[in-house]
Amino acid sequence: MKNLSALQQNLTEKGYAFVDGVPPQSIIDTVITGFRSLIEEAEKDENFLKKWSFDLSKTSNEGVDDGLIRRSGGIHDKKYFFHYRPRLLKLLEWSEVDTTDYKEFLKACDVLYKHSLGLACSVAEKIMVPVNDNETQPLSYFISTEASKNQHTLRLLDYDVKNSVEEFLAQPHADRDTLTFPIADSHPGLVLLTRDGSQFLYNQKGYPGQTLVFGGKKLFTRMGGNIIYEKIGFQSDLQAVPSVFKYIEKFEGGQITPTPHWVRLPDGMIGVKRWSIVFFAHDATAQVPEKPGTIYFPELDKKVA
Ligand SMILES: [Fe+2]
């Protein structure tokens, strides 16, 4: 492929890149204040949580959910998250949820969503993907389709407090989406495994006015990559889910390999509550195989342990 943009080159060769633009701090503050308030109410009242949760996995081909979601263990890391995409406003309205106290919060979520989608489009404009043997097309063509619009997600995360730097707030994984934008966080903790096998501990303060971006599985398959799952044994240390097989996830071919990443508390941050805001941009037409079970990262085994 000729004339790679600097951005495409960084995503290919390093596994991440930066794009100019950050949202106003006041918007982030409003979003986090509202999110915290929602969690507080949900902790007090299970019905409140139910009202603000929309599980659309039965009606969507992507297993997506909207609104406030609590994950409470099993194979998942314990956390609250909130998914915002514009259709949430309709879902809240149709379900007659009282949003009086959350008008500013929802408005700020929408601002943040649109800001992030703008970043995604400007990045996608600079990435050329093959459409056949002779032709390439900007990635923005795929992430701007109607189907993709229902999948882009602004995710607010509130992690469970950990008492050891050894524990993960998010286990090593690669994202299913096309482009991931870590928009803001309370403090560092996100670590990327870069192409040369080194770890990049992202500290947003070191990149003023810029936003980090890295690729997920849909970008990889869109650019000709194959994802293969190889069964390597039985996962016996997960007592909550006793019959799960371990797999190695292999990325073959393609141009921009998905970037494995995880979240852990940095030194000196034990017991500190962490929040983060991430935007996931999707190419709804890209095919990604269903993850079969627990994924094992042999290349991380020594480095992360
Ligand atoms: Fe992720």
Image: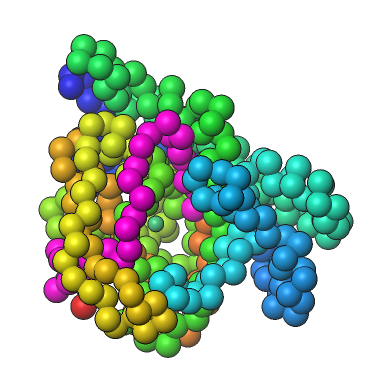
Residue at left offset 32%, top offset 63%: 293
Res 302 → quadrant: bottom left
The reply to whether residue 248 is in sight is yes
- The x and y percentages for residue 178 are 39, 40
Q: Residue furthest front?
A: 243
Q: Is residue 37 left or right of residue 303?
A: right
Quadrant of the displayed image that contains ligand 1 = bottom left
**Along the line of sight, the residue nearer the viewer: 183 or 248:** 248
Residue at left offset 26%, top offset 22%: 130
- The x and y percentages for residue 162 are 44, 83
- The x and y percentages for residue 27 are 65, 51
Stretch in magenta? 278-304
- The x and y percentages for residue 136 are 28, 17
Asked if 293 appears above or below 2 in the picture, the reply is below
Q: Residue furthest top?
A: 134
Q: Quadrant of the N terminus?
A: top left
The reply to whether residue 41 is in sight is no
Whether residue 42 is in magenta: the answer is no
Q: Is residue 236 left or right of residue 108?
A: left
